Image (cartoon, helix red, strand yellow):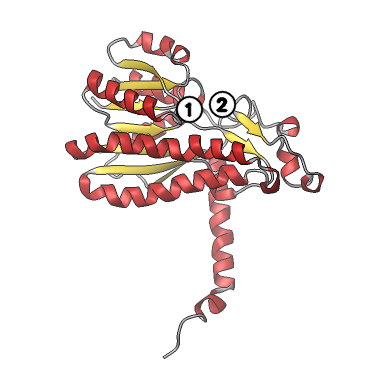
Amino acid sequence: MSTWLITGCSTGLGRALAEAVLDAGDQAVITARSAASVEDLAGKYPNTALALALDVTDQEQITDVVRRSEARFGGVDVLVNNAGYGYRAAVEEGDDADVQRLFATNFFGPVALIKAVLPGMRARRGGAIVNVSSIGARMCPPGSGYYAAAKSALEGMTGSLRKELEPLGITAMAVEPGAFRTDFSGRSLTQSATVIADYAGTAGKRRKEVDTVHGTQPGDPARAARVLISAVNSDRPPALLLLGTDAVTAFSGVLDAQRAELDSWRQQSTSTDLTA
């Protein structure tokens, strides 16, 4: 029986994952900024679930949640950094305070949680860290520059973390979901107050008031949760797990375009080496 610590469990993928983990017989520390939003789920599994309040930007709460998780279940075997939210703005429109909050939640919060659980994982020489990113980190859509940057930072850190932890029997992987039927494009989506008319044809097309994606996303969070659990439990968890046909299609398109550009500029790129 493994113990999972999952952030952002009030709705969406986090809640679906918590339900799937508990249904499978594992233990789960299910967290949200308001513990009340997940107490109903914990009540269904009184012996294997622990509902706790956690704002991932609060270091004291992070320390307390990990301490209480270890006290209740003996240790955290799987950390899933799922909590996060979107932010829409052209780069020039972005508010400094908004961007700092975005990175505090989507990057620095996960880092703090990783650092909090790793001493226990290292002592046991086992564990898994799952960082939920986004296909947006690969696609970099207009209007999502800051969000893509935060998720790219998370993925870059995860790649190095994986190499650091593999000799210790611990794995780390990034997850890139496509569009899933969650609140991400609705309640959880924020945007800049500043609107610059020159970006109406790019970033402006993706502002909340004109975005029609919410409620029409193709992805099923319950199915994504099952795939994620399977990946964590596999003999060789992937470094990067894509979720959704749209994510796979978009990822493939980006790779093809990057390969074509690499080949187009190969001669110029390699001409910069010192010659004998």
Left of 210 or right of it: where is 116?
left
Figure quadrant of the N terminus: top left
Q: Which residue is denoted by mark 1 in the rendering? A: 13
Q: Nearer the viewer, residue 56 or 265?
A: 56
Tell me: residue 195, above or below residue 11. below
Q: Nearer the viewer, residue 276 or 60?
A: 60
What x and y, as percent, mark residue 130? Answer: 38, 38
Image point (81%, 44%), residue name: 197
Q: Is residue 30 in view from this perspective?
A: yes
Classify mark 2: residues with Cα within 10 Å, few (<14), some (14-19) or many (20+). many
Amino acid type of the residue that numbered disc 2 sits on in the rendered structure: Thr
Q: Earlier in the sequence, mark 1 or mark 2?
A: 1
What x and y, as percent, mark residue 207? Answer: 72, 36
Q: Which residue is denoted by mark 2 in the rendering? A: 182
Residues under labels 1 and 2: Cα distance? 7 Å
Figure quadrant of the C terminus: bottom left
Q: Is residue 231 in view from this perspective?
A: no
Classify mark 1: residues with Cα within 10 Å, few (<14), some (14-19) or many (20+). many
Residue 29's label in the rendered image is none
What x and y, as percent, mark residue 253? Answer: 58, 53
